[in-house]
Image (cartoon, grey):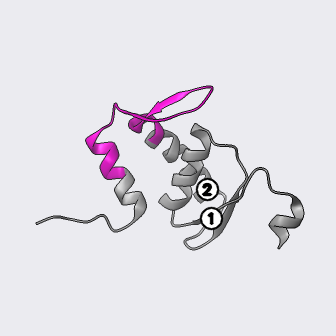
Amino acid sequence: MWHLPTTLFDHFKTTVNKYPDSLAIADNKQRATYQNLLEEVGKVSRYLLESGLKKGDRVSLVITNSVEYAAVFYAIWAVGGVTVALNTQAKARDIIN
């Protein structure tokens, strides 16, 4: 029987388990395997929990595409938060509305 992941973060962990040493993401400055990315996600997750983030809390992201962006994005999911990704090119009036 096929087991479907229950969350998108569960799907990410399944991918990490299958391909830990494969390239997960690269930007102009660095590259990260799935295992490296999971380790970064763990660090950010701990920080978010220590900062008081609770399940269902929304967290806005205004970060350019990078390894850090992916780590923060998945960390928010890992602790049950809701990622609200904002366009780094957006003007304040666009975000307010």
| Residue shown at the point (30%, 51%) measured from the top left | 14
Which element type, helix, strand or loop, lies under badge 2? helix
Count how many numbered circles sit on residues in the image: 2
User: Which residue is outermost to the right?
Assistant: 93
The N terminus, quarter of image: bottom left
* Amino acid carrying mark 2 in the image: Leu
Residue at the disc numbered 1: 53
Q: Give 3 or 41, whichever is nearer the viewer.
A: 3
Q: Which mark is first along the chain, 1 or 2?
A: 2
On screen, residue 32 versus residue 16, left or right, reads: right
| Residue shown at the point (61%, 40%) measured from the top left | 68
Question: Is 67 above or below relative to 75?
Answer: above
The C terminus, quarter of image: bottom right
On screen, residue 66 versus residue 25, left or right, reads: right
Which element type, helix, strand or loop, lies under badge 1? loop
Residue 82, how many percent across, how many down?
58, 67
The range drawn in magenta is 13-37
On screen, residue 43 versus residue 9, left or right, reads: right
Residue 67, how many percent across, how many down?
57, 38
Residue at the disc numbered 2: 48
Q: Give 46 or 58, whichever is nearer the viewer.
A: 58
Residue 51, magenta (yes or no) = no
Residue 21, how many percent across, how many down?
34, 31
Residue 83, how many percent across, how many down?
60, 63
